[in-house]
Amino acid sequence: MWEEETADSFRRKLLWWIGGLVVVAVAGFALWYRFLFHPAENAPPAVVAKPAAAPAATQPAVSNPMPAAATGSEALPALNDSDPMVQESLTSVLGHPTIEALLVPQNIVRHIVVTVDNLPRHKVAVELRPVKATAGQTAVSTQGDLTMLSDANFERYTTFVHAVQAADVKALAALYQRLYPLFQQAYEDLGYPGKYFNDRLVEVIDHLLETPEVAGPIQLEQPRVFYTYADTGLEGRSAGQKLLIRMGPANARIIKAKLREFRAEIVAKK
C-alpha cells in the first residue's frame, strides 16, 4: 500500500511541474514578443539623472588658533623619521642633562600627543609616556591602621619639576609651533581626522589648571598592587589631576604656573 500511494503521489506532482513549466514558457514568450515588436509602448519612462550636489566644503572649527607669526615654511622630516630632529631641538631648549634624564627618545611626538590626549582620562598608558618613569616607589606614612601619602613622596618629582621651572616658555612654545605639523599629523593618526591638536592641548591645560589643591594628609588604600586615594572624589579624578595631587601642592603650583604661561604663548590673542 505504501509503494502504490507513493508512486501515485509522484505522478501527480510530475504533472503539476510540467504544467507549471508550460505556463512559464508561454508567459515568457508573450512578454518577449510584446517588447520585441512594441518597444516604444513598453519602455519604462526615461529618468534624467540630476548632477550630484558638490559636497559642502567643511573645515573643522578651530577654537584656539596659534599666533599667525608662528606659521613657518621649514621643511620637516616625516613623522616616523622625526625623533633625531625633535630630540636635538628639545635639547637646544631644555638642555642636554634634562633631556638625558627625562626624555624617552623613541616616537617622541606620537607619545607626547597620546599622553596629552589621555591626561583628562582615567588612565595614561605607561608604555606611551614621553618621559621616563619617576624613580622609586610611592612614599607613604602610617598612623595606626591608616596609610597616608608622605611628604617625602613629593621629592620624587624634583628633577621633573626643576626642569619645568627652568624651562624658557617662549622658546619652548616657539619650538612647538615650528614642529606643529608633526603634532597635527600624530593627532589625526590617533583617530581625530580634521581635529585641531592645539585645541585639544589647550583643553587639557585648562583641565589640569582646575586640579584642586589638597591640603594633606591624603589617605591611601592598597586594594591590589598600587595605591589608590581613599577619598572617592580624588580617586575619581583624571589621571592628570591625580598626578598633580600626587606631586604635592608646592610642585603642583609650579607646574600650573608654567602651564598658564605656555597656554598664553600658543593661543592667538583676540
Image (spheres, rainbow, N blue to C red):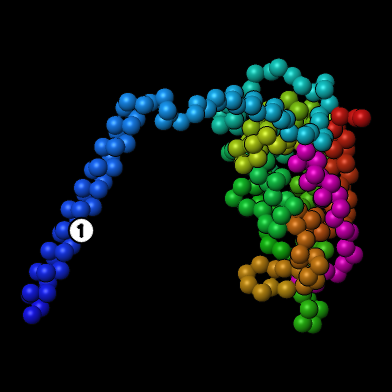
Q: Is residue 141 visible?
A: no
Q: Which residue is drawn at 63% across and 72% down?
A: 224
Q: In this picture, which residue range is highlighted in magenta? A: 199-220
Q: Which residue is drawn at 80% across and 23% down?
A: 70
In the image, is residue 217 part of the stretch drawn in magenta?
A: yes
Q: Which residue is drawn at 29% across and 37% down?
A: 30
**Quarter that holds the N terminus:** bottom left
Q: Residue at x 82, y 35 (%)?
A: 64
Question: On the rendered structure, is 79 left or right of 33?
Answer: right
Q: Can residue 147 be seen in this view?
A: yes
Q: Position of residue 104 (x, y in %)?
A: 62, 42
Please name whichever residue, 257 or 191, is drawn nearer the observer in this view of the structure: 191
- Residue labelled with disc 1: 16
Please name whichever residue, 41 or 141, is drawn nearer the observer in this view of the structure: 41
Q: How many labels does the image show?
A: 1
136 vs 183: above or below: below
Type of residue at label 1? Trp
In the image, is residue 64 part of the stretch drawn in magenta?
A: no
Q: Quadrant of residue 239?
A: bottom right
Q: Quadrant of residue 153?
A: bottom right
